[in-house]
Amino acid sequence: MTTVSRAHSEAGEAGAVVSRLIAANETVLRALTGRLRARPPRFVIASARGSSSHAAYYGKYLIEQTLGLVVAAAAPSVQTIYAAPLHVEDALFITVSQSGRSPDLVAMAEAARRGGALTVAMVNDAASPLAGTCEFVLPLHAGPELSVAATKSYIAAVAAFLHLVARWTGDAALDAALVRLPGRLRTAFTQDWAALSDLLTDASDLLVIGRGTGFAAAKEIALKLKETCGLHAEAFSSAEVLHGPVALLEPGFPVLALMLDDAARDGLTRVVADLRAKGARVLAVGPAATVPALPGLPPDHPLCDALPIVAGFYGGLDALARARGRDIDRPRHLRKVTETL
């Protein structure tokens, strides 16, 4: 009998985590969004590493599409190595971290607060140095996450961004979709992604493509395939893949396409057709998938629909890692908390 990995078990908790997060963070979000409405920020900066940076990238698309505010990615080394001052007056500075203990992220949040930004921590450890540094803390409520590969904390961080945007904008449709999200995550996690192993058990390379929040999710999927399966996977926006990465394609080259039923659907469909015509072996997932496809959910809200795709991927990741001879709970050369400067 195959033993379920710790990573798989923790990923399966994501639906419960999101339910808990929504219920627990209402009070702090009322205070935070009240502040944001009273003094709207001129722009937003996101600071994060690893899977948390992919959650922040998802948040970038959410904020830019709904609020029209530019979201920039912080470069912590500018502060920790090069000691450059930050002039971020009237900015919203959001740091995303599972542990809240990486020195560079803490130092960057401190510098942003000194520089005049409103600082927010999205962090799983509400007693961490990062939480103590920021003016507002949005706990992820993921509970202990012992597996090296961040799964439920990644989904919680994206849900925290969705929760923030829903409350900040007062978008009733997004709010309703957020309520439905935990159930959709549970369903997606239990779907059969055996076709992923069929595609990738013997693969050495993979392109993962998407657009908008689908591209943000593609970045997370590519990272997890590297760290848990030893697979060289790279994520590209479907707008960029034909500008250079397409030169990698040989007959049978695997491509995973994340296809959402949103404004980018038609363009992504054309790119997928082009890649298939060039000989790529494309496997699609998502509400708009039209080629050989993995199981997915029907569309709900275009800003939420990429997250169940990630949950489904997490559900199938254990089997793929085993098929490739990897122990998903013991990724090579990695440890749970990486402290960078």
Image (cartoon, grey):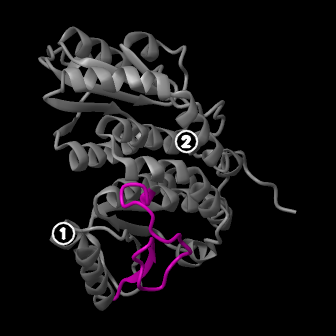
Q: Position of residue 224 (x, y in %)?
A: 50, 53
Q: Position of residue 268 (x, y in %)?
A: 27, 74
- Mark 2 residue element: loop
Q: Residues within 10 Å of mark 1 (few under 14, many from 20)?
A: few
Q: Which residue is mark 2?
A: 150
Query: As shown in the figure, which amino acid type bears the numbered disc 1?
Result: Gly
Secondary structure of the magenta portion, mostly? loop
Q: Is residue 98 left or right of residue 186?
A: left
Q: Is residue 85 left or right of residue 185?
A: left
Residue 89, image quadrant: top left
The magenta segment is 279-306
Decide: is 55 above or below 201.
Answer: above
Decide: is 66 above or below 84.
Answer: below
Depth order, front residue of 89/40: 40
Q: Position of residue 175 (x, y in %)?
A: 43, 46
Q: Is residue 119 left or right of residue 86?
A: right
Total marks placed: 2
The residue lying at 63 percent from left, 62 percent from top is: 187
Asked if residue 287 lies in the magenta stretch, the reply is yes
Mark 2 and mark 1 lie on one chain; the one further toward the N terminus is 2
Decide if residue 303 is in sight here: yes
Residue 136, image quadrant: top left
Q: Tell me, for residue 244, which label it has, or none.
A: 1
Depth order, front residue of 312/326: 312
Depth order, front residue of 173/331: 173
The residue lying at 45 percent from left, 16 percent from top is: 131
Depth order, front residue of 271/117: 117
Asked if residue 18 lies in the magenta stretch, the reply is no
User: Answer yes or no: do the residues labelled 2 and 1 have beta carbons within 8 Å?
Assistant: no
What's the CA distance linking mark 2 and mark 1? 30 Å
